[in-house]
Amino acid sequence: MKAASSRTTKRADKWPKEVQPGRAIVRVYRRRSPSGNFNYMVANYADGQRRRFDSYPTEADALDAADKLARRLDSRDYVAAAMTKDQALEYANAVARLKPFGVTVDAATGTVAECLRTVGDLSNIHAAVKFYVARHKQAVKKPVADALFEFLKIKEARGAAHRYMTDLRGRLEKFAADCKKDAGAVTTADVQEWLDGRKLKPQNYANYRRILHVFFAFAVSRGYATDNPIEGVEKVRVSGGDVEIFTPAEMARLLDAAKDKFPGFVPCLAVGAFAGLRSAEVERLEWSDIHLAERFIVVGADKAKTASRRVVPISDNLALWLADYASKEGRLFSDGSALFHSLQRRVAAATAVEQDAGKNVPAQKAVAWKGNGLRHSYASYRFAQIGDAGRVAGELGNSATVVHRHYKELVKPGDAVKWFNVSPERPKNVTPMSAAAANR
């Protein structure tokens, strides 16, 4: 409604004019500008504190605004009445933005205010929303068991090592048997509870966590899960403990026992002890990888744990231990990991000696088998022998940092001499294989 229909002052040409459509009165003032034109101002006391003048270009606009202001004041709409033109424009824009979502300005601002109390500022609200969307985006439903079947099939097709595949299956199939959820529904709490329930030792726990992380990373990449729940699973510190090595005397007893009772296993022990290959690498090694005449072993990328080719020297004593097997072909050991590790323990047990008073032979306890003892022994004695961490690391297929951390000054150079002198006893008329090979 225009101001013309409102009650104004009795004399139309009297300024300021009063607009009173109801009980409230609003005054309109006229002022002449320096240019000689009139400006029209509406006195606004809507904020209840001090007068504010809102300017308008024409008398009609000013009277219309005064009429609306008075009506708002009559209806107690003081906040709306106190709004400036810029504030009114902001309000109109807010209403327009929220309209497609069916949300009122009041509801929206109430929610924003609550969020601000929680996260502090608008940028954090936006970040929280993005995180929520990423975490709750729709994933393709796939039971853990089905996702695992696909995962293992792809790993196998890409040529994953047999030993690695065995480890994956052994651990993940246990998890899948207990977890009947879709991959995308598995939470960090689910996995943590499962791992805790198995009461695993630190190293075994860490191995499970690592392999589960690989599996769920696959699930995320295929859209079966929106995030990797293993990220939040507790990490445990795995203590490396003291590096356990064999003494030269213990190694001699192990090799003698193997030569007597398990002769086919002698090369495996010798290569581990005097070339430092990992047990899994020894299992994969072919006789064609051993260049006895040239005195080196090639550990191919397909056989090395790090998938990186390396060349390891053959020491004089290792050449002697391998001499009797120079004509063999195929793998050094082809009967599987379970038997390989069983033979290690059986060889150690075979070193026990019973007392024979008649022959003046004292009793000797069996040599205790040490996990990774052959490789640790080689690394320790080799580092003491040459003092070059980088070279030893290259032979081992790890880093100089690892060599320094675990093997520095673990043994004395004199012990290294004894280690690399552990050789098979031979009749004096037998020419060592190293010499025979060199003369071919």
Image: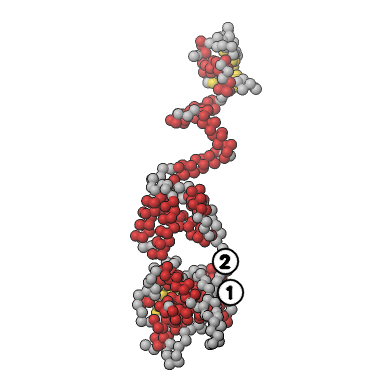
Q: Is residue 194 above or below residue 280?
A: above
Q: Say which of marks 2 and 1 sits in front.
A: 2
Q: Is residue 336 above or below residue 108?
A: below
Q: Which quadrant holds residue 332? A: bottom left
The amino acid marked with disc number 1 is Leu
Task: Identify the element where label 2 is drawn.
Answer: loop
The structure residue drawn at horizontal position 46% and vertical position 44%, both measured from the top left corner, is 135
Crowding around mark 2 (Cα neighbors within 10 Å: few <14, some 14 to 19, many 20+) is few
Q: Foreground: 69 or 117? A: 117
Residue 55: give x, y in percent of width and height: 56, 22
Give me the disc on residue 410: 1
Q: Foreground: 347 or 244? A: 347
Q: Which quadrant holds residue 243? A: bottom right
Residue 394: give x, y in percent of width and height: 48, 72
Give me the disc on residue 241: 2
Pointers 2 and 1 in contact (C-beta within 8 Å): no
C-alpha gap between disc 2 and disc 1: 14 Å
Residue 416: give x, y in percent of width and height: 55, 80
Sequence-earlier tag: 2 or 1:
2
Query: How is colour applied across the structure in the image?
Result: secondary structure
Q: Quadrant of the C terminus?
A: bottom left
Can I make out residue 386 in this image?
no
The amino acid marked with disc number 2 is Gly
Residue 393: give x, y in percent of width and height: 50, 72
Task: Identify the element where label 1 is drawn.
Answer: loop
Can I make out residue 153 in this image?
yes
Residue at the limit of the structure toward the top, as seen here: 10
